[in-house]
Image: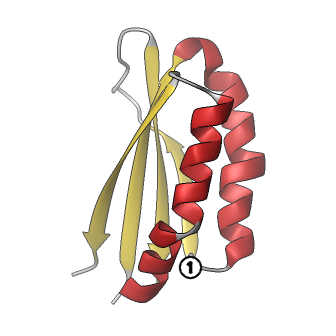
Amino acid sequence: MRHTLSTTFLVVEEVANEWIVWMKFNYIEAIKKSGLAENLYFNQVIGAEQEGGLTFSVLAVFSNKQQEKTFLDTLDFELTNQINKTFPNKVYPFRTNLQEI
């Protein structure tokens, strides 16, 4: 049974373009290289614009709960810290865990 981790990011509009490039070449690439996720999807959420901010989503699909746990315990923590250091007070992530039915 596959597990999906949905990470939604509210990004201050003034850094959105720079953040998108950073995400593609750092965040997404690191997850791909780890081999933990079966599939990755990086999207902009349409119609969810906030005043001064844009919303994006990364869906990471894992083959099983253990791969998701390994990701959360290691790589996710490191990548979140990198985002906070690179874009302080400009990017606000939150996570939702989904399980395939």
Q: Residues within 10 Å of mark 1 (few under 14, many from 20)?
A: some
Residue 74 screen position, x and y as percent: 55, 69
Q: Is 95 situated above or below 38?
A: above
Could you tell me which residue is drawn at 63 percent across and 19 percent down? 15
Task: Mark yes or no: residue 90 visible.
Answer: yes
Could you tell me which residue is drawn at 57 percent across and 35 percent down? 84
The quarter of the image holding the C terminus is bottom left
The answer to which quarter of the image holds residue 2 is bottom left
Residue 12 screen position, x and y as percent: 51, 18
The answer to which quarter of the image holds residue 46 is top left
Name the image colouring: secondary structure
The quarter of the image holding the N terminus is bottom left
Q: Which residue is mark 1?
A: 38
In the image, taking residue 47 as reference, residue 73 lies left or right, namely right
Could you tell me which residue is drawn at 44 percent across and 77 percent down? 68
Task: Mark yes or no: residue 64 visible.
Answer: no
Q: Is 68 situated above or below 52?
A: below
Could you tell me which residue is drawn at 42 percent across and 87 percent down? 66
Residue extending farthest to the right is 25
The answer to which quarter of the image holds residue 55 is top left
Mark 1: amino acid: Glu
Residue extending farthest to the left is 101
In the image, taking residue 49 as reference, residue 54 lies left or right, namely right
Residue 88 screen position, x and y as percent: 57, 25
Helix, strand or loop under label 1: loop
